[in-house]
Amino acid sequence: MKLINFKAIEKKWQGKWEKSEAFKAKDGKGKKFYVLEQYPYPSGSGLHMGHAFIYTIGDIYARFKRMQGYNVMHPIGFDSFGLPAENAAIKAKSHPKKFTEDAIKNFIKQMKCFGFSYDWDRMLRSHDPAYYKWDQWIFLKMLEKGLAYRKKAGVNFCPKCNTVLANEQVVNGRCWRHEDTDVEVKQLEQWFLKTTEYADELLSGLDKLDDWPELIKAMQRNWIGKSEGTEVDFSVNDKKWKVFTTRVDTLFGVTFLVVSAQHPELMSLVTADRKAEFEKFLRKVKSTKEEDMDKMDKEGVFTGSYAKHPLTGKKIPIWTGNFVVADYGSGLVMGVPAHDARDWDFAKKYNLKIKQVIEGDASKEAYVNYGKLVNSDGFSGLNSVEAKEHITIALQEKGLGRKKIAYKLRDWLISRQRFWGTPIPIIYCDSCGAVPVREKDLPVKLPENIRFNSVENPLIGNKKFVNAKCWKCGGKARRETDTMDTFVDSSWYFLRYLDNKNKKKIFEKKKADYWMPVDLYIGGKEHATMHDIYFRFYTKFLADLGLLDVREPAKRLFPQGFIYGEDGRKMSKSLGNIIVPEKAAEKYGVDGVRLFLVSVAGPDKDFSWSEEGAQGSLRFILRLFEYFRNLKTGRSSRKVEHYMNKAIKTIAHDIECMKYNLAVIKLRELFGVIEKEEVGKSDLESFVKVLCVFCPHIAEEFWAKMKGKGLVSLASWPRVNEKKIDDKIEEGDKALDKIINDIAHIVKLVESKGGKAENVYLYVLPHELKNYNNKVLSERTGLDVKVYAVNDKDKYDPSGKSDKVKPGRPGIYVE
RNA sequence: GCGGGGAUGCCGGAGUGGUCAAACGGGCUGGACUCAAGAUCCAGUGUGCUUAGUGCCUACGAAGGUUCGAAUCCUUCUCCCCGCACCA
């Protein structure tokens, strides 16, 4: 076997694709298809196998759709703001811009090596002022619409990142980037985007996303966490405190209220005599680590205050407790120990009154089911469902309650106390307060000259940046030094690709209307409750601005699987099990790596890298080369035509369903047929076309060898000729395989008994004769095989085997 | 606790009512080639039985059920992975 210089082949075709602008997407022409892979963070370590995988998945689909005649949008860019570059820059006393741009160069080089069919003209980088200008512009629009606001709140702060985090970026009380670091709660004035404004649509929209995985939708539903209930006012010293409940039917069973220990106005409830005990309790709560929360006992302290029950007027003690979530509902809950497990525990522990108001056994534990009301004044006798309605109405009439929908979803905290991000376009004027930067003054650029220090955002010390003039009053002002969460950048990048050079507008509506929505979006599952919510939120907002018509960004979402090392563990430096795509491509060729990545399992499944498996893919490719080296075309038999058309048909379906592994199998099987048969030129072309979506470089090579017209990458997907599909041919082949097996078996038996096996005689029903060709049989069995029709009078049949012949079961005689 | 998804041969993984002892790849075994190794090619690879073959048996997490017929549908159970988690 000759060695094949894959690299030369790859370079050659990549050059031709680039030169001919093969993968350019043309606006507004014909039926479109938008394939998008999540744009990468350009890390210093370059493209890893996970990148190679996700881009291969997208590339296969893009190439497939392109060959099917779609006008394909397949862009790429870089999520180039973010912490790692900044940290690296601090370490090296350099500027993150340099780091980032070097990394991007490296990424581009590596991506081009993989032959991804991107329209590189549409490339964007989020750290480019021409890009983040529009981040700022959107922010101003949100501000204008009341969707961006500033508030002081207890926010999650990661001491390692040295910045606050969004709710979504806190995992089990720890930073999403630092599994070992507990987040601290700090009271800070921060900028928020009102995702909750769209909570309902974010939720209901999921029902229409049929091509999104159930898992992702379930996670989002859970994250949004809609509950319908009633808000009840309890008055304390003539001040109203709102309480949210989904079980207002148990209102008469309230025997205490519990305020969250983090409630901002908690101290106003604490009476003087209880202050000391209180502070002790609060200190304890504060020192409890998030990780212990789930094991934590419910604890609380009596505040000394009482509330008035809205319907009975009875005095109800107010406690504070460590188990009440501060920022859900109103951070205050009613305690109904008879019918709520948590309240039961609390009441038992502190000996609080338990009053049963729903029929059922509430003697040993809380009875939490719905049922008939008792002890509830005029509402007794109603069932829970009716009672909810009636009690809410009664409260409403008194102005002491109303229907209310609560969400777990929180507004998105976007302020980051870091340098390497989009500046928030706000200035603070002593007399005018927070003033938005005027649109014409955008972008607010990050300074090039900065000096990092280890404690704080270097923007704070940068006078040139900070000092500003208020455009309203002309007075002195200070520029906001916080930057935006990088998830802001990625919330709308897919729109900018469509018009990435537009200096006047964020993007042309006409273009967005043509290309949107993204038809296939490939990305990681880890974004289910972050990016995958944010980009939907942004799309809805931009649609409300009238910038585009669609309200959902992606028609189909495809979360790819995760690639583990050969040992089945996560690839990591310390385990030494990292497979670098570039290196792998040197061994197996780019097409070998691409093929292997989609061969093992469906692209949505996790799998482990395997050198042996990659070898297997390479083996197939080498076989292809061998075949095309001695290329001889002829005329396809009916058989070849059958397998060809059937394969094309099923492969197209498999690709459509993202079952690339099955498509590859069928391609291999098809080649197995081709290898052994005479094949017509156009059929062989079809084969190369199908091959091209997986292994574009070698496919081009073979195409050229066959003198195919133009580039196979731009050829049209082979049309299936249904008439050529004839399953009888396949049945015949199976019958042949079977008889060969049987012959082998009999030969073995004969020889094991010391007999000789040289001649084989087959007795076949006349209409099956065409399935059994004596030449083929002789070749495959290595014996002299003669085939007779059962009704052949001159047949040689010494032991009458032809008497036993049945349909599909020829008789066999061996001697 | 709630929600989502799994459990198939030595392994990775197909298969969602019959054509399934189960695609394809890997591994392993045997053979061809070779001085040899590698590569490549060919054959075999559940168990036991039976036999000049296409047969029987057992098997798709476990147990039941529906059906003429189940890896595939239903019920219950066990185990595994993932996400959320005191959201009132």
Image (cartoon, coloured by chain):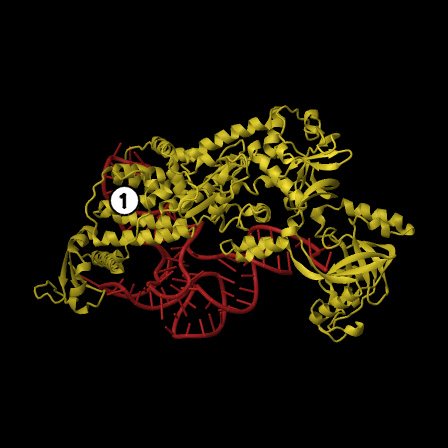
Chain colours: A yellow, B red
Q: Quadrant of the C terminus of chain A?
A: bottom left
Residue furthest to the right: A273
Across and down, in percent, residue A26 comes to 42, 40
Q: Quadrant of the N terminus of chain A?
A: top left
Q: Secondary structure at mark 1?
A: helix
B30 to the left or right of A29: left
A676 to the left or right of A401: left
Across and down, in percent, residue A615 comes to 37, 40
Across and down, in percent, residue A395 comes to 78, 65
Q: Which residue is mark 1?
A: A685
Residue furthest to the front: A473
In the image, residue A309 sits, relative to residue A160, either above or below, namely below
Across and down, in percent, residue A478 comes to 73, 31
Decide if residue A248 is in sight here: yes
User: Residue A143 versus residue A596: which sits nearer the camera?
Assistant: A143
Q: Amino acid at mark 1?
A: Glu
Q: Residue sitting at 37 percent across and 35 percent down?
A: A17
> The numbered mark 1 sits on a residue in which chain?
A
Tell me how many marks there are: 1
Picture quadrant of residue A623: top left
Decide if residue A174 is in sight here: no
In the image, residue A494 sits, relative to residue A441, either above or below, namely below
A718 to the left or right of A187: left
In the image, residue A736 sits, relative to residue A195, either above or below, namely below
